[in-house]
Image: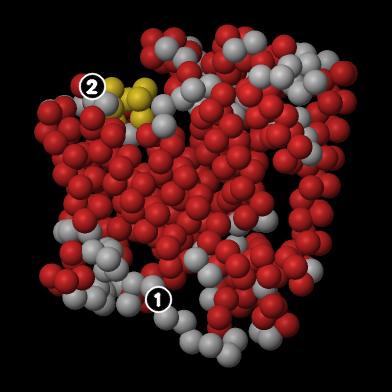
Amino acid sequence: MSWRRTLLALAALFVGVVPRAFAHEAYVISYDNFWRGVNAGYSLHAFDALRNPVDLHITLAIVLAVLLVYVLNFWFRLSRAGQNVTAFFERFARLGPHLVRITIAAALIFSAASDSFLGPELHLGLLPYPGVVKLALYLMGVLIALGLFTELVALAGVVIFLASLFTYGHYVFTYLNYFGELVVLFLFGMRVASLDRYLFGPLRRLRVFEKYETLIVRVLYGLALLYAAVTIKLLHPALTLDVVNNWNLTQFHWLFPSDPLLVTLGAGLVEAAIGLFIIVGFEMRLTVLISLFYITLSLLYFRELVWPHFLLYGISLNLLVQPETFTLDHLIFKEHRLAMQWWKRPFAPHNTVGKSDESFRA
């Protein structure tokens, strides 16, 4: 068995269901073919797979298997062992924002080096004054990494992102994960392990709103996944069909359905579900772990470019270690659920009961 088949088999064992093609179409299809497919108009052809009784039965079986996995994880979270796992992850919460900071800095530098804007399918040359934008991306990456003039640099990034809408259209929403982190850096800066702290001291403005930092990043990341799933995989299924057929994924009969259209539909539904679960914060860590596993699997199997995935890893690892404030998980699972009214729980820090909260940016 080849290493690629082994990786796919491990993916199936990891979640207990048949995995889908989780590739980023823009990274594995030629530039011209990708944009030809995006501009071809919307289609609901992927849902035609459900007209096939065999495909419908497979879909129902997979849905039931996924529900079983999440139910089992729910009961595990309620156990003592599950609470210990949650506490272990949250011990590293202070490291999370630094991971995102490092990965967005690296992504911006590599983006400029590859003459791309945020992703390889967005050619930098299409923007007005591409040389200026390229230099700005380099400077933004370096200054964010150093933590120097962070708020001004992030504001410049927000402006460039919004301006790019006039060139790339709404497709740029695929990269809302960048936008979310730039907004957070603009609002709250970076005053830990940064030159800004030594030059300007602690940032005292907007401190009351810092508790929403992870929420902003999480929601915009989830929206990016949801947008890509709906607009690319579900409404432009020809692109994912090309990936399935070009890579002959259905040859793995023991792993993939024989119908390429069902693989396409499944890819879109899985990515949409992951994005939606991340937005509302439902079984967050399981969902993020599954998405990370598929992203890594896709990266290795399809030999995609590494740098566009930097920020995906940074945000995902940050979500793994952050307290689950403003999530459904926080409402359901936390130990203080009996210590305050249910409607207050989603908005209260984990350490509300018996402790005082100290922001890591202090």
- Residue placed under numbered mark 2 in the picture: 126
Q: Nearer the viewer, mark 1 or mark 2?
A: 1
Residue 107: x and y, percent? Answer: 32, 39
Q: Residue at x 66, y 15 (%)?
A: 249
What's the amino acid at mark 1? Ser
Q: On the rendered structure, is 36 left or right of 91? A: left
Q: Residue at x 76, y 56 (%)?
A: 73
Q: Nearer the viewer, residue 1 or 242?
A: 1
Q: Image check: 350 left or right of 111?
A: right
> Would you say residue 326 is visible in this rendering?
no
Residue 39 on image: x %, y %: 44, 15
Badge number at residue 359: 1
Which quadrant of the rendered structure holds the C terminus? bottom left
Q: Which mark is residue 147?
A: none
Q: Is residue 226 above or below residue 30?
A: below
So how many labels did they put on this image? 2
Secondary structure of the residue carrying numbered label 2 = helix
Color scheme of the displayed model: secondary structure
Q: Is residue 282 in view?
A: yes
| Residue occupying image coordinates x 78% and y 42% | 66
Residue type at mark 2: give it.
Leu
Within 10 Å of disc 2 (Cα), the crowding (few <14, some 14-19, many 20+) is few
Q: CA distance from mark 1 to mark 2?
A: 41 Å
Regarding mark 1 in the picture, which secondary structure is present there? loop
Residue sitting at x 46%, y 50%: 315
Answer with mark 1 or mark 2, whichever residue precedes in sequence: 2
Residue 79 in picture, x, y percent from top left: 79, 69
Measured as percent of width and height from the top left, residue 301 is found at 56, 24
The quarter of the displayed image where residue 203 is located: bottom left
The front one of 167 and 143 is 143
